[in-house]
Image (spheres, rainbow, N blue to C red):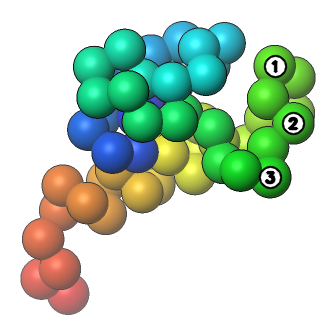
Amino acid sequence: MYCANCGNQASWRDPTCNKCKKPLHQTNCKTKSSDCKCHQINEQAWTQKKTPDTI
């Protein structure tokens, strides 16, 4: 999964990013479970962060 803060690829099993040390999971996430939605949330957040608002 991507880190929403820096875009680093990390394992969803890791609680924090090994690059920038920010939490990989949302505060309301049940973590460590297959129904973790943070992968999509982080990917979307990172895409929005790295793409300037040109729309």
Q: Which residue is mark 1?
A: 32
Q: In the rendered structure, are the residues bearing label 3 and label 1 in contact, judged by CB atoms less than 8 Å apart?
A: no
Label 1 SS: loop
**Residue in view at x 12 percent, y 82 percent:** 54
Q: Residue at x 45, y 55 (%)?
A: 44
In this view of the protein, which residue sits in the foreground, 54 or 19? 19
Q: Amino acid at mark 2?
A: Lys
**Amino acid at pointer 1:** Lys
Disc 3 from disc 2: Cα separation: 7 Å
Q: Nearer the viewer, residue 26 or 50?
A: 26
Q: Locate residue 11, reporting x and y percent.
A: 54, 12
- State the residue position of label 3: 28
Q: Is residue 14 above or below residue 49?
A: above
- Residue highlighted by disc 2: 30
Gap in angstroms between the C-alphas marked 3 and 1: 12 Å
Residue 17 at x, y percent in the picture: 42, 23
48 w.r.t. 7: above or below: below
The answer to whether 47 appears left or right of 35 in the picture is left
Q: For this rendering, which residue is in front, 55 or 13?
A: 13
Q: How many marks?
A: 3
State the separation of the CA atoms marked 1 and 2: 7 Å
Question: Does residue 23 appear anywhere in the picture?
Answer: yes
Mark 3 belongs to which amino acid? Asn
Element carrying mark 2? loop
The answer to whether any part of residue 34 appears in the image is no
Instruction: Say few, some or many: other residues with alpha carbon within 10 Å of mark 2 (under 14 / 14 to 19 / 20 or more).
Output: few
Residue shown at the point (26%, 38%) measured from the top left: 6
